[in-house]
Amino acid sequence: MGALYAENFDPERDARQVVEGIVQTVRHEHPDLTVHTEVIEGHPAPTLIDASQGAELLVVGSRGHGAFVGMLLGSVSEHCVSHAQCPVGVVRHKRESS
């Protein structure tokens, strides 16, 4: 049987590259803003709640793909809003124009 993943598959490295690209744009546009990044393996909701301890702000995205039609927040963002130890900013995904 062949390998399940490509030999050079490294999800942590890939995640770091994506995050750094986004953060570089933010830092360029807002040079006085302090941004801390960390790549952590685990289920998003409890991992983000743990990260909220001692934070000034937790920012999460939401595509609104919850179980109920018309739901404003996804399950992870809703969990963070309800349980985080700091203020939470929820950024909605922009819908494609048709």
Image (tube, grey):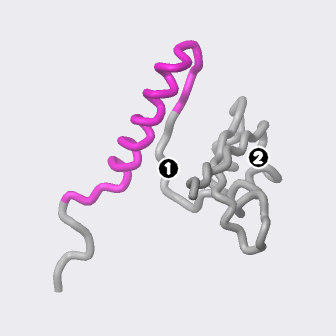
Per the model, the C-alpha gap separating discs 2 and 1 is 17 Å
Residue situated furthest right in the rendering: 82
Residue 82 in the image: above or below residue 85: below
Amino acid beneath label 2: Ala
Residue 25 in the image: above or below residue 12: above
Magenta: predominant secondary structure element? helix
- Residue 32 placement (x, y as % from top left): 57, 13
Quarter of the image that includes the N terminus? bottom left
* Helix, strand or loop status at disc 1: loop
Between residues 64 and 48, which one lies in front from this camera angle? 64
Residue 67 colored in magenta in the image: no
Q: Is residue 9 left or right of residue 97?
A: left
* Residue designated by label 2: 84
- Residue 27 placement (x, y as % from top left): 49, 22
Q: Which residue is located at x 46 percent, y 36 percent?
A: 22
Which region of the structure is painted magenta? 8-36
Residue 42 in the image: above or below residue 67: above
* Residue designated by label 1: 40
